[in-house]
Amino acid sequence: MNAILNALARAFVSLLHPKMLWLMVWPVIVALVLWVTLAVLYWGEAAQWIAAQLHHWPAYDWAVSVWPLKLVAAWFGWILLLLLFVPAVLITAVMIISIVSMPAMVAHVGGRDYPGLVRRKGGTFAGSFWNAFAALMLFALLFAVSLPLWLVPLLWPVLPIALFGYFNQRVFRYDALAEHATAAEIAEIVHRHRGGLFLLGVALALVGHIPVLGLLMPVYGGLAFIHYGLERLGELRSAPIEGAAVRV
């Protein structure tokens, strides 16, 4: 837990640097313009399609037949789209930052905070793109599979935090280490610290749900994972030989 809090604190300090300001703004602006444009063009059709798909599930028909969901049944597609709008913007911004901005962020943080950490360049642009695409596909699959559970009131606060926690760590962990670690070191850190990576992703998912401040999450999240990953890489390399053997 201390490692997660330390990464979050150091990420906040890095976020205040002038070099991070533009990186913090433009991905969110691009994502907002994209989704606002799509909403203007296709909102009504999308709401109708969602409503039609939901009616294929007996659990949905049962849920909206009881109070209080019965009161919003006719508008459920619109409500669901409204609830998905901000997450869609954040996911898009995270994808943009992961593919485009993370190298500059890693260079900034690595040069200032971890100058002694040798860069072994185990990651590639193709690997970053594939990692982001795979994360998005897995997130979409998990969302689709868990969608009926979103009708259970007690799970409403839990599911989005868990899903976005998984998505955050799945996207950022590779890019945070790609410049400095070898492929084997990346795999070893993910294997050793899978729980910590997920908890850091969950913490950032909670930040993403804070109104207005949540829009800073994509860059803040990238910085937090850079600090967490490079700190773990330094520990891995400084460990005794018998304890630092990297699995191939």
Image (tube, rainbow, N blue to C red):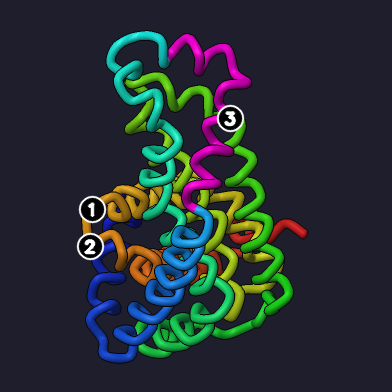
Position of residue 144 in the picture relative to residue 77 (left or right): right
User: 26 or 184: nearer the eye?
Assistant: 26
Which residue occupies the extreme right position in the image? Answer: 248
- Report x, y in % for residue 23: 38, 82
Q: Quadrant of residue 187?
A: bottom right
Give the vertical position of 239 relative to 135 (above or below). below
The secondary structure that most of the magenta stretch takes on is: helix
Q: Quadrant of the C terminus?
A: bottom right
Residue under numbered circle 3: 52
Question: Which secondary structure, mark 1?
Answer: loop
Q: Amino acid at mark 3?
A: Ala
Q: Are marks 2 and 1 in contact (CB under 8 Å)?
A: yes
- Nearer mark to the viewer, of 3 and 2: 3
Residue under numbered circle 1: 210
Q: Are marks 3 and 1 in contact (CB under 8 Å)?
A: no
Q: Earlier in the sequence, mark 3 or mark 1?
A: 3
Residue placed at 40% from the left, 27% from the top?
A: 74
Mark 2 neighbour density, 10 Å: few (under 14) some (14–19) many (20 or more): few
Q: Amino acid at mark 2?
A: Leu
User: 12 or 51: nearer the eye?
Assistant: 51
Q: Is residue 44 magenta?
A: yes
User: 64 or 119: nearer the eye?
Assistant: 64
Give the vertical position of 37 relative to 26 (above or below). above
